[in-house]
Image (cartoon, rainbow, N blue to C red):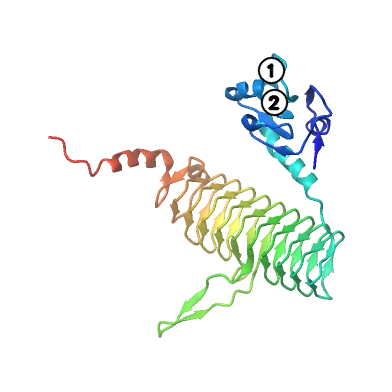
Amino acid sequence: MEVSAEVIAQHFNGEIIGDPSVKVSSVQKIEYGKPHNICFLANPKYTHYLLQSNAGVVIVSRNLVPEQPVKPTIIVVENAYEAVPVLLDLLNSLKKSKKSGRAFLSYRALSCKIGKGVYVGRFSYVGAKTKIGNGTQIYPQVYIGKDVTIGENVILYPGVKIYDGCIVGNNCILHANVVIGSDGFGFAPQPDGSYKKIPQTGNVVIEDDVEIGSNTTVDRATMGSTIVKKGVKLDNLIQIAHNVEVGENTVIAAQTGIAGSTKIGKNCKFGGQVGISGHVTIGDGTMINAKSGIFGNISSAEGQKGLQGIPAFNMRSFLRCHVMFKHLADPPKK
């Protein structure tokens, strides 16, 4: 799908220098730009690439407008870096035309309620009394159980599984093989050394504008709800256990595991492979570096300074300790 420089400039309320009719179809780094590409210049150290670029269009920050003529059409905006995600979203929306209707070999229970413009792909299953909002896209081989509620304009990629009674809000994206509502890890030890399964009777609530990466699992609550709040972004291969609450606009990187009944505040940022034990509270704005372990409550004042280590503590203190740790094995000086 091609789009003209004029349309792009209107989208950003930008100023055009050059030919407004030039059309581009994909984004590329400025050093590799071809006539069908649109590129960005937000960092002054890459300015020399603009002078030799063959790109069709280049978006530049206002303070980086070239003083001499260049081959590409220029679109001047206040901040080219901030324009990147907006443009990618624009091009993506133009490329992806929504489907609607029910594909051959899909199944929808008679009692389910399907909104307008919904697409159900091949070999997908929609259970009884389930409600699906307008414009939602259900790709092939998706399973949606009974009494599930899914909002509008949701995308469920192939292999997503949503168990009975769970709720997914509007404008959510669940990537391939996400599992929502599987049983929490609850077992009661018995006198003979065996374990008796504790029934997991709650559900999962995913609020609006949440994106969940491939192969991530969010377990249903033992009682009540496991809640992923508005604007949360979860990477691939994350485990969210039963009765966890993840606060608004929190971002969590891959392979993180969060144990049961933990409460995470809003606007937190967790690196990859972070481990968080159960029944702890983590304050708003907490930043945890990769491979760290959390075993107790973290206040906002403590967490906003950044944490690292196992168990995690102040990042600056950790780095000072690490300098000493590296020299513990050094032979003593004579």
Residue depicted at 82% across the width and 71% down the height: 112
Residue 225 in sight in this render: no
Quarter occupied by the N terminus: top right
Q: Nearer the viewer, residue 129 or 311?
A: 129
Disc 1 residue type (three-letter): Pro
Q: Residue at x 67, y 65 (%)?
A: 159
In percent of width and height, residue 9 lies at: 80, 30
Q: Secondary structure at mark 1?
A: loop
Of the residues shown, which amino acid type is indicated by label 2? Answer: Val
Residue placed farthest to the top in the image? Answer: 67
Q: Is residue 174 above or below residue 34?
A: below
Residue under circle 2? 60
Query: In which quadrant of the rendered image does the C terminus lie?
Result: top left
* Circles 2, 1 touching at the beta carbon (< 8 Å): yes
Instruction: Please name the residue that numbered disc 1 is placed on.
Output: 66
| 5 left or right, relative to 330 | right
Q: Nearer the viewer, residue 304 or 142?
A: 142
